[in-house]
Image (tube, rainbow, N blue to C red):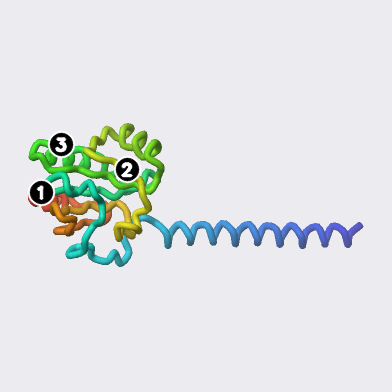
Amino acid sequence: MKMWAQRLEIVTNIAILGMLCLLLAAFLWRFWHSPQPRGQHSLVGTRLDIPQVRRSPMSIVLAIDSRCRYCTESAPFYRRLTNAASSKRVNTIAVLPQAESVASQYLSEKALRFDTIVSLPLETIGVRNTPSVILVDSNGNVMAAWVGKLSEAQESDVMSRF
């Protein structure tokens, strides 16, 4: 009987160590795959191939993800940004990787209004990290881009560009 108790203790210890390894792996995966920018390449000078940018001389493209903590935390700024843009007749486009129904619901919950909502993988427009605010001319050329949760100075910079 003592031998079975020792074997059970060994098996239990191995199971506990295995679970700890899985938890550590999950934590490390989330850390390395977080939406906080890490080495975002510059989009400035590239061209976004989104047909909706040709509707006005200037467009603001907001690349966000409904699962992104920084996107949600930045919603008050995005509300101010889209309100200011619409008053100046600047086209606003939200690009999300989720289905349009999920994207629309997320934007509605955050009280964010855009002229256009596009559902496509963010990598197809060159975006690696969310949130990304991209200022685009009527030909789709990126004039400026900001990545991550912006500071007050960066928010002011964005607002001064249009």
Q: Nearer the viewer, residue 110 or 124?
A: 124
In the image, residue 88 lies at what x, y percent? 8, 40
Q: Secondary structure at mark 3?
A: helix
- Identify which residue is drawn at 13% across, 37% down: 86
Screen quadrant of the N terminus: bottom right
Q: Give the residue type at disc 2.
A: Thr
Report the residue marked by disc 1. Answer: 57
Q: Give the residue type at disc 1.
A: Pro
> How far apart, in angstroms, are the residues tagged by discs 2 and 1?
28 Å
In the image, residue 121 lies at what x, y percent? 37, 53
Tell me whether the residue at label 2 lies in contact with that at label 1, contact meaning CB atoms closer than 8 angstroms. Answer: no
Q: Is residue 105 in sight in this rendering?
A: yes
Q: Nearer the viewer, residue 132 or 101?
A: 101
Q: Is residue 69 in sight in this rendering?
A: no
> How far apart, in angstroms, are the residues tagged by discs 3 and 2?
17 Å
Q: Give the residue type at disc 3.
A: Asn
Q: For marks 2 and 1, give the one nearer the viewer.
A: 1
Q: Residue 16, relative to residue 71: is it above or below?
A: below
Report the residue marked by disc 2. Answer: 72
Residue 23, picture quadrant: bottom right
In the image, 64: left or right of 45? right
Label 2: few (<14), some or many (≥20) within 10 Å?
A: some
Whichever of callouts 2 and 1 sits on the residue coming sooner in the sequence is 1
Disc assigned to residue 87: none
